Amino acid sequence: MSSALQTVTPKLFQDCPSPDVVFETSSDDSLDARHLRSFLSTVMPEGAIGVSASYREGCQLSAIAFSSPSRALVVHLTSDDLSVGNNESKRKRIIRARSVLQKQILCNTNYQKYAFKMDRIAIALYLDVALRIDDAVDMLSVSLHNRRSLQALMNALGGEFTLHKPNVKALFFDESRHMSNSELVQQAWAACRASTLSYMAVRFRVLKRIRTNSIPDEHMAVLAKIFRDGELLDSLKPLAVKNDVMPDIAGGMDNLTLTCNRYPTRIRTSTQQSLQIETRKGAQVVGRAIRVEGRQAQIEILGTLQDDEVKSVTTFGKADLTSAEACRESVILSILKGASTVMSHPFFKTIWLPGDPIHWPPSDHQKSEIPICCGDLKVNASQKRAIEKILSPSDEDRVVLIQGAPGTGKTTVITAAVTSIIWFPPANNRTVWIAAQSNVAVKNIAEKFASIGFYDFALLVSKEFHFDWCVPVYL
């Protein structure tokens, strides 16, 4: 399927006339060298090509767009599994077209590929259509702001004062609808345009390139799984949340303080979210959280709500990434750029690449066997075997996975292992860190320690998990 030529006029930059961008649309079972020649003939001498992508439900790559300053090509990608089915001729056409696309553009080092979220595109190309990319620039890497924020995008585009901010926001941040071909073209064109700005080209030049064609297949498979799992979890986050708050309002003309009732629906500070506040008297104002401490949220508002009570508060927009989510995204981006050695770490390899040779560095700690010592804590035979594995000085036991249904005593195993280490004289100078996915899990372990009279520990919880959310943790 190929479409007739179409035209779109981006209105994103203030400092230049809006050009007409001619674009052609093709599916990967009808793409041929003619499409690529027509497009590549318009690429500027410096070889900059803007890239953007759209995604299906399930975060799978749906279409990819390439743009020069004056022309663009949109390729819609087949979602079918090419290893099955009876249409052999179609399968061969798709494989041939993707091969040409990779050779002529994606891995052609005569062209530098620019995209605002090149990490996501590079992963999706590998995972969904088995393609690699070379000499690819992640443009958001020039900004120190949150990668998901409007400010980071505007920095990558050349700066807020050069842009029509409302148009940029509408084009890049509306997650409620599927992206059209013309919008996909405008995003790719914006990437190409920003890359050719003289003052931005200097900044982009020093960025490390993404080269997935130089990453081993088994490593790419691991990166793709970790990245896609994170994407799927992020896609489940709601775009609107009704916040449970106390009806009382405290504040002045342009700000107020709200008290949250429930931790799961608490108000959070976010670069991407806004609040809609409705009062008993029917007034509605828009605001955003500028400071949150415990249950108290300070809100900056457009309007006033004096002498009234809150009826409802709703947060619109997806929540920012958690610290762990942002760290995962940052590490994967560094690996794609060849700037991280985390995949060679024995801890990582034990979990994700067990077939690779694993060499643990010599331990500085005592190699003596640590006996189980857990006070009055009772352990059964299965728990005893798990504890012995944790305490083992053997390299093959450096990483131990213990699986058990709720109520089988995993917290007991953790408690017994920690007290055994701390109470064993040759090892009692160690510091033991216990990390858990939730604050409640940490609370359960702390309570288990206290139940056997062990209090030599400190609790570290996220800053927003203030003491007034869960008082028993601190007693």
Image (spheres, helix red, strand yellow):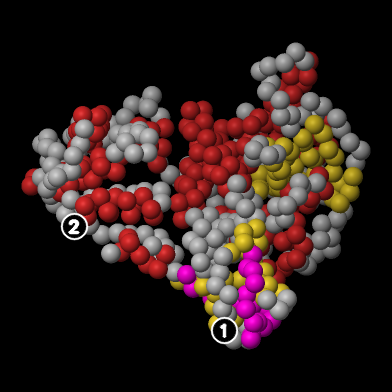
User: Is residue 344 found left or right of 337 in the rendered image?
Assistant: left
Circle 1 is placed at which residue position?
251
Contact check, label 2 and label 1, Cβ < 8 Å: no
The residue lying at 65 percent from left, 61 percent from top is 316
How busy is the neighbourhood of tag 1: few (under 14 within 10 Å), some, or many (20 plus)?
some
Choose the circle earlier in sequence order: 2 or 1. Answer: 1
Q: Which mark is residue 374?
A: none
Three-letter residue code for mark 2:
Asp
Above or below, comparing residue 53 to residue 350 in the picture: below
Farthest residue to the right: give it.
4
Instruction: Decide which of 215, 323 is in the foreground and name it.
Output: 323
Q: Is residue 215 visible?
A: no
The stretch drawn in magenta includes residue 313: yes
The range drawn in magenta is 295-314
Amino acid bearing label 1: Gly
According to the picture, the residue beneath numbered tag 2 turns out to be 456
Say which residue appears at 71% left-offset and 25% top-offset: 80
Q: Is residue 216 above or below residue 291?
A: above
| Residue 57 picture location, percent across and down | 68, 39
Foreground pick, 450 / 300: 450
Q: Quadrant of the N terminus?
A: top right
Provide the major secondary structure of the magenta segment.
strand
Q: Residue at x 28, y 31 (%)?
A: 359
